[in-house]
Amino acid sequence: MNNHIEAAVQEIGKVLLGKEEQIRLSLCCLLSRGHLLIEDLPGMGKTTLSNALASVLGLSFNRVQFTSDLLPADILGVSIYDQSSGAFSFLPGPVFTQVLLADEINRTTPRTQSALLEAMGEGQVTLEGETRALPEPFFVIATQNPVSQSGTYPLPESQLDRFLMRIELGYPDPAAERELYLNPVNASQVKDLRTCLDPAQLTAISAQVQQVHASDNLLDYLQRLVAYTRNSAEFAFGLSPRGALSLLLGAKTWAVMHGREHVLPEDIQSILPAVAGHRLQPTRDFAGDSAALVRNLLANVDVIGG
């Protein structure tokens, strides 16, 4: 299975140059059956990465461009009255797919953002009193621009917490950017990426993740990290139980991706910024952002408790 995962990393790397760490984190999120939030400035490759992930996973894919006038029905679907039959028929929206790209999710209103909540949390949607299951598996890959950009609506905490990970892409290094100048990536290249994992393999990886062993010492370390966020003065609030479980799940998947059947502290440390960064906020007295807060957390919690 590791060969397939490595092949997926290399395949995505053909269209997203110099971003291997972000690619691995993205795959870790989706292999954990979580939802992914990609945040960065426009033009940094967010949509390219999203399309590439869907291609290498070999799953059905829909994209929704979120705008200020988008309505919940534009995502979920709507019932239409059929005069010939005298009955209503349901027209499913783009959410009825295995991979949904919610492009620029913070450019739409909170009402429309919240329409995704049940779908992301429960794998189903309820419309007009009827519950409809979504395809299996179901992933949301959302992109958003920084809230400092004009025309954005910050995602509420309840919506942010639905995302297992949040990553940033950042500017490419000089070598990758030079390669991009010489060989620009186009949409057809992304569509032509080779499928490296199929639904059966995704199911097998999920089963493998559940069998990964986390020792008592490892769980002690995890609990010390969580306790520090809840008790230290620089945190406005601590990690929730769901946040802690997300951290453990992601660490188990990271271990599987590296060919191990047990979790190491390094697995937690590798994914902690992506899992916890959007769940933690500093107090006003802390001189730094959430990224600095996570670095502080890692530096102040020992792997071996005293």
Image (cartoon, grey):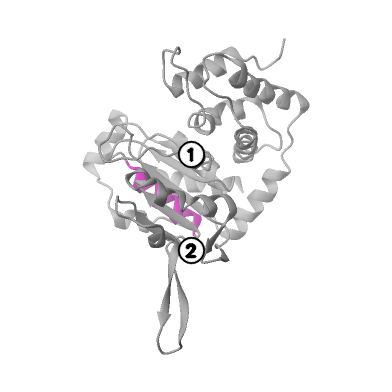
Residue 231 visible? The answer is: yes
- Three-letter code, disc 1: Leu
Provide the residue designation for mark 1.
160
**Where, by quadrant of the figure, is residue 83 drawn?**
bottom left
**Residue 223 falls in image quadrant:** top right
Q: For this rendering, which residue is in front, 47 or 297?
A: 297
Answer whether residue 269 is magenta in the image: no
Instruction: Name above or below for residue 277 compared with residue 283.
Output: below
Locate residue 66 relative to residue 282 in the image: left or right.
left
Q: Quadrant of residue 301?
A: top right
Pointer 2 residue: 96
Instruction: Give coordinates of residue 247: x percent, y percent.
Output: 61, 33
Instruction: Answer above or below: position of 4 versus 26.
Output: below
Q: Position of residue 67 (x, y in %)?
A: 30, 51
**Which x, y percent locates residue 202?**
60, 54
Contact between labelled residues 1 and 2, with CB atoms less than 8 Å apart: no
The vertical placement of 269 against 180, above or below, is: above
Q: Nearer the viewer, residue 231 or 300?
A: 231
Q: Nearer the viewer, residue 198 or 83?
A: 83
Judge depth for marks 2 and 1 and give the one in front: 1
Q: In the picture shown, does residue 148 fall above or below 28?
A: above
Q: Is residue 14 visible?
A: no
Residues in magenta, as a range:
45-58
- Tell me, for residue 289, which label it has, or none: none
- Is 99 placed left or right of 214 in the picture? left
Q: Is label 1 in a helix, a strand or a loop?
A: helix
Give SS at disc 2. Answer: loop
56 in the magenta segment = yes
Compared across the picture, whether 15 is left or right of 30 comes to left
Amino acid type at mark 2: Phe
Task: Give the residue displayed 45% in from the left and 12% down from the top.
Answer: 285
